[in-house]
Image (spheres, grey):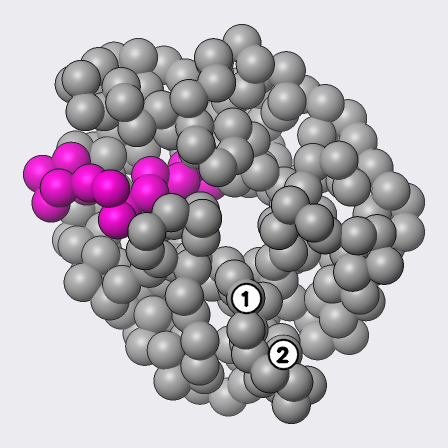
């Protein structure tokens, strides 16, 4: 798989708390230039970025980020506002405490609620794999499959670990056929990117791949 093919699977990402508009603009410019799948940016910049890119690239944003423990109503409002502001892809974080408490029906209902808001727009469900047991990851594959969401996503990039090859293998084994996989966090090389895609990932949440292509130091998400 060549570099251009890899870039088509990248959600070019900047979610750092201190991100400035100039940095977000650069993410948008690079995403357009290198034809990435989307740019993934904080909700507060979605309207401005959407107006800036004028439909030249998909705008992705995050909901309930990064901890996932806001209420479903709050996530629903965030999602509606993000879509109204021009987002076309939503990456939501589950309530991890609910998963630990085995409140599986509540998690599924929350995902269904946000998917209902999204309609035909893409919904990705972040489960923060580094905090979960193998059994919990399998359960989330089942819940995401039943919920109607479009993707399961490994990580926020803000916890104790990011995507691993083993998690992508596990997802590929336990997800329904209509659910795609997004690997995110810690993808630091083109070799990593190729491996994640070969194992079944459809999207890669990272800023480093574009930086590598630009021959810049590949640090960050």
> Marks 2 and 1: which is nearer the front?
1
Q: Residues within 10 Å of mark 1 (few under 14, many from 20)?
A: some
Q: Nearer the viewer, residue 190 or 211?
A: 211
Q: Secondary structure at mark 1?
A: loop
Q: Position of residue 185 (x, y in %)?
A: 42, 59
User: Which residues make up the magenta segment?
Assistant: 123-138
Q: Position of residue 208 (x, y in %)?
A: 55, 73
Q: Nearer the viewer, residue 49 or 198?
A: 49
| Quadrant of the rendered image containing residue 5 | bottom right
Q: Is residue 56 above or below residue 15?
A: below
User: At x 58% / y 38%, what residue is drawn?
Assistant: 62
User: At x 38% / y 29%, what residue is drawn?
Assistant: 94
User: At x 18% / y 63%, what residue is drawn?
Assistant: 166
Q: Is residue 18 visible?
A: yes
| Residue where numbered disc 1 is placed | 220
Using residue 3 as the reference point, say whether residue 77 is left or right of it.
right
Q: Is residue 160 above or below residue 109?
A: below
Q: Is residue 181 visible?
A: no
Q: Label 2, label 1: how many angstroms apart (C-alpha)?
A: 10 Å
Q: Is residue 168 above or below residue 144?
A: below
| Residue where numbered disc 2 is placed | 211
| 135 falls in the magenta region | yes
User: At x 17% / y 54%, what residue is drawn?
Assistant: 170
Q: Position of residue 133 (x, y in %)?
A: 13, 41
């Amino acid at each position: 798989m060549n570099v251009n093919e890899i870039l088509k699977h990248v959600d070019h990402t900047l979610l750092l708390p201190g991100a400035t508009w100039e940095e977000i603009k650069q993410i948008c410019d690079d995403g357009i230039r290198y034809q990435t799948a989307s740019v993934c940016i904080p909700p507060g910049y979605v309207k401005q970025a959407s107006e800036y890119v004028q439909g030249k690239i998909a705008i992705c944003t995050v909901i309930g980020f990064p901890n996932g423990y806001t209420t479903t109503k709050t996530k629903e409002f965030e999602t509606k506002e993000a879509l109204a502001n021009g987002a076309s892809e939503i990456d939501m974080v589950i309530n991890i405490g609910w998963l630990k408490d085995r409140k599986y029906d509540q998690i599924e209902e929350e995902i269904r609620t946000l998917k209902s808001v999204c309609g035909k727009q893409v919904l990705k469900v972040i489960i923060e794999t580094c905090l979960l047991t193998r059994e919990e990851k399998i359960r989330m594959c089942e819940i995401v499959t039943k919920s109607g969401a479009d993707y399961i996503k490994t990580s926020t990039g803000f916890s104790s670990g990011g995507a691993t090859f083993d998690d992508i293998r596990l997802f590929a084994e336990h997800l329904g056929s209509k659910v795609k996989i997004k690997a995110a966090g810690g993808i630091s090389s083109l070799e990593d990117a190729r491996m994640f895609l070969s194992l079944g990932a459809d999207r890669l949440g990272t800023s480093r791949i574009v930086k590598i292509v630009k021959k810049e130091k590949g640090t960050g998400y």
